[in-house]
């Protein structure tokens, strides 16, 4: 009696090897799919990781001028390369949001403040710098005193979470 005479024993071994091979192939396919999905989601989240205190408002330059009905705010950016920021200003009844981009552009109802004049061409501060902006509430159609200003960075095309919020406004 040789090994080939016991055909039932041989077919059980072959079936076991085939099942193990199929399991390994299926596990490989699942692993590849999940790995690609996780890597894609992680790379998008990495651009927004570590923003703590790198994009914020300078509190001492953020205030409300009740005579001209303008909100002044100062954005400070740390060691970070940002495409743009979205700024939202809210009152008890209304709100408005707008984007400030790296490349100079005009933003309705918003001007940059350089200490002496209000500049029409709006740009985002570069790395390790800050800029002060003045938003005209009346021409923007916002009634009331601002109760909140928020800043949301956009990095590598990904909109991040709110990086900073000011809710207590002093008088300019």
Image: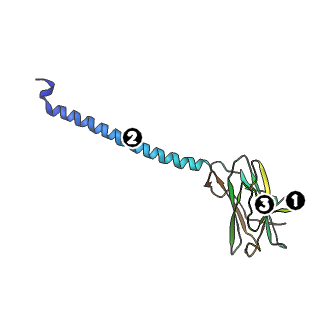
Return the x and y of residue 67 as percentages of the image width and height: 85, 73
Packing grade of label 1 (10 A; few <14, some 14-19, many >=20) is: few
Cα–Cα gap, marks 2 and 3: 54 Å
Query: Do the CB atoms of the residues marked 1 and 3 lie less than 8 Å apart?
Result: no
Cα–Cα gap, marks 1 and 3: 15 Å
Residue indicated by mark 2: 28
Location of residue 4 by image quarter: top left
Location of residue 114 by image quarter: bottom right
Packing grade of label 3 (10 A; few <14, some 14-19, many >=20) is: few
Q: Is residue 153 left or right of residue 137?
A: left
Residue indicated by mark 1: 115
Could you say whether the residue bearing mark 2 is in a helix, strand or loop? helix
Could you say whether the residue bearing mark 1 is in a helix, strand or loop? loop
Q: Name which of mark 2 and mark 1 comes first in the sequence.
A: 2
- The correct choice, above or below, for 28 with respect to 142 in the image is above
Say the numbered circle drawn on residue 121.
Answer: 3
Query: Do the CB atoms of the residues marked 2 and 1 lie less than 8 Å apart?
Result: no
Query: In the rendered image, which quarter contains the C terminus?
Result: bottom right
Return the x and y of residue 166 as percentages of the image width and height: 73, 62
Q: Residue at image x 61%, y 53%? A: 157
Total marks in image: 3
Could you say whether the residue bearing mark 3 is in a helix, strand or loop? loop
Residue closest to the eye, 170 or 84: 84
Return the x and y of residue 27 as percentages of the image width and height: 37, 42
Query: Do the CB atoms of the residues marked 2 and 3 lie less than 8 Å apart?
Result: no
Cα–Cα gap, marks 2 and 1: 62 Å
Residue closest to the eye, 134 or 59: 134
Q: Nearer the viewer, mark 2 or mark 3?
A: 3
Q: Residue at image x 74%, y 55%? A: 124
């Amino acid at each position: 009696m040789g090994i080939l005479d016991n055909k039932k024993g041989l077919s059980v071994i072959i079936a076991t090897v085939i099942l193990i091979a199929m399991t390994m192939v299926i596990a490989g396919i699942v692993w590849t799919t999940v790995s690609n999905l996780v890597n894609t989601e992680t790379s998008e989240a990495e651009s927004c990781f570590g923003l703590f205190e790198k994009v914020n408002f300078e509190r001492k330059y953020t205030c409300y001028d009740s005579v001209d009905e303008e909100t002044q705010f100062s954005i400070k950016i740390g060691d970070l390369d940002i495409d743009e920021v979205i700024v939202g200003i809210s009152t008890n009844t209304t709100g408005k949001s707008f984007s400030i981009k790296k490349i100079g552009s005009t933003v309705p109802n918003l001007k940059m403040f350089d200490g002496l004049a209000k500049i029409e061409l709006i740009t985002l501060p570069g790395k390790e710098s800050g800029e002060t902006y003045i938003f005209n509430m009346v021409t923007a159609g916002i009634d009331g005193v601002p109760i909140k200003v928020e800043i949301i960075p956009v990095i590598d095309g990904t909109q991040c979470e709110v990086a900073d919020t000011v809710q207590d406004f002093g008088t300019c």
